[in-house]
Amino acid sequence: MTGTECFHAALNLLAETPNSGVYYEQFALGALNQLLSNSLREINAEHVFRAEPVLDAPPRLHALSDEIPAGDWLVRECFPYGLAALLVADDDKAKFNWAANEYTDRLLRHCPAQFTAIREMV
């Protein structure tokens, strides 16, 4: 999925169209790179799951026309919600909360490995 396709999916979630949501486009690339940075743990969990080397730094998207450098499950299932949340964070708290919760729920549901804290047994 390209950055543009993810942006259009996020606009759809916000009940916007590419024409009505043109204001948000200026923020989309930075927001997608923020999602990539925030998702390094999940990206690396997928790399471990596939026996691939883990990344030391998050991947970056250089243009909206580029493919988002992360797993398909993460990009298709989670990123549109995360992007939608970041785009409306200052404008609409209700939409932000809804989209952020969806992003988090989907992230937990689809991640091939989840890291949990070690608890001492008594």
Image (spheres, rainbow, N blue to C red):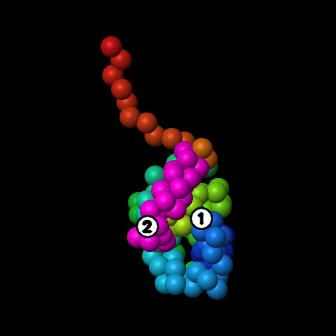
Q: Which residue is mark 1?
A: 80
In the rendered structure, which amino acid carries the disc numbered 2? Ala
Residue 54, relative to residue 26: is it above or below? above
Main SS, magenta residues: helix
The magenta segment: 86-108
Kind of residue sitting beneath label 1:
Pro
Q: Which mark is residue 89?
A: 2
| Quarter the C terminus occupies | top left
Q: Can you see residue 108? A: yes
Q: Tell me which numbered mark, 1 or 2, is placed earlier along the sequence.
A: 1
Horizontal relation, residue 1 to residue 26: left or right: right
Residue 11 found in image quarter? bottom right
Image coords of residue 10 (percent x, y): 60, 69
Q: Position of residue 82 (x, y in %)?
A: 52, 62
Count how many numbered circles sit on residues in the image: 2
Q: Looking at the image, which residue is at 63% across and 65% down?
A: 13
| Label 1 Cα crowd, 10 Å radius (few <14 / some 14-19 / many 20+) | many
Residue at position x 47%, y 67% in the image: 92
Asked if residue 77 lies in the magenta stretch, the reply is no
> Image height check: is 105 above or below 99?
above
Q: Position of residue 111 (x, y in %)?
A: 57, 47
Name, please, the residue furthest toward the top.
Answer: 122
